[in-house]
Amino acid sequence: MFSRILERLRLRGLFVTGNKFLVVAQTSCMRRDQTHLWELFEPIVSGMGYDLIEIEHFPNPKHGVLRLYIDKEGGVNVDDCSSVSRQVSAFIDVEDPISGQFNLEVSSPGSDRPLRRLKDFQRFVGSLVKLKTAMPLEGQRNFKGRLLEASEETVVIETDTEELGIPMGVIEKARIVPEFNVKK
């Protein structure tokens, strides 16, 4: 299966060298904006002892939203979110890095938390995950399975029918699927 994925990447004009993937794609305006925001806010959040998990920015002339998801060992509470919100808000007031009006929201990532970085994937090995790829692999873009392992090159999941190795470079979105034990 993995060799078929590599061949499909080559056919799509993506470069594969040994075990390393170089996915060449145009960066959308939103992705550049995300990178810029990440560079602005990650040092503030990490300096306060939290991990910045994700940033969502929905610009709108009147009702924009800037949402930061934070976490720390043992989880976060309302006081943590409030503290980060005050600090980020003060930074925004002074530096004015984002044009337009928006509401700042700071939240925990929740039980269906996004997986963005390698350390996020490695932390949640054994969890049920949903993955969406930037392009179809074997005719599909959405995958769901148990996360078995993660490296810089590949994420391995076990679906109901098979074990799949998905190149890290083609994963567009990834989230934990919450599992609830219901007693009957």
Image (tube, rainbow, N blue to C red):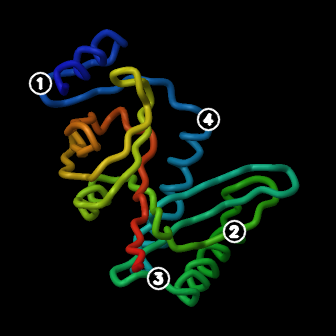
Give the amino acid type for the residue marked by disc 2 in the picture.
Answer: Leu
Which residue is drawn at the image coordinates 19% and 52% (left, top)? 148
Q: Nearer the viewer, residue 164 or 51?
A: 164
Instruction: Looking at the image, tell me whether mark 3 or mark 1 is earlier in sequence order.
Output: 1
Label 4 packing within 10 angstroms: few (<14), some (14-19), many (20+): few
Q: Nearer the viewer, mark 3 or mark 2?
A: 3
Quadrant (top left, top right, bottom left, bottom right) of the C terminus: bottom left
Task: Report the disc number at residue 8.
Answer: none
Could you tell whether 60 is left or right of 182 in the image? right
The residue depicted at 56 percent of the width and 54 percent of the height is 37
Q: Earlier in the sequence, mark 2 or mark 4?
A: 4
The earlier-in-sequence mark between 4 and 1 is 1
Instruction: For marks 3 and 1, give the one nearer the viewer.
Output: 3
- SS under mark 2: strand
- Pick whichever of labels 3 and 2 is earlier in the sequence: 3
* Tags 2 and 4 touching, CB below 8 Å: no
> Which residue has dot 2 on it?
104
Mark 4 sits on what residue?
29
What's under tag 1, amino acid-wise?
A: Gly
Instruction: Write the residue at 61% across / 40% down.
Output: 30
Question: Mark 3, residues whose alpha carbon is within 10 Å: few (<14), some, or many (≥20)?
Answer: some
Depth check: give the residue in front, 121 or 15.
121
Label 1's element?
A: loop
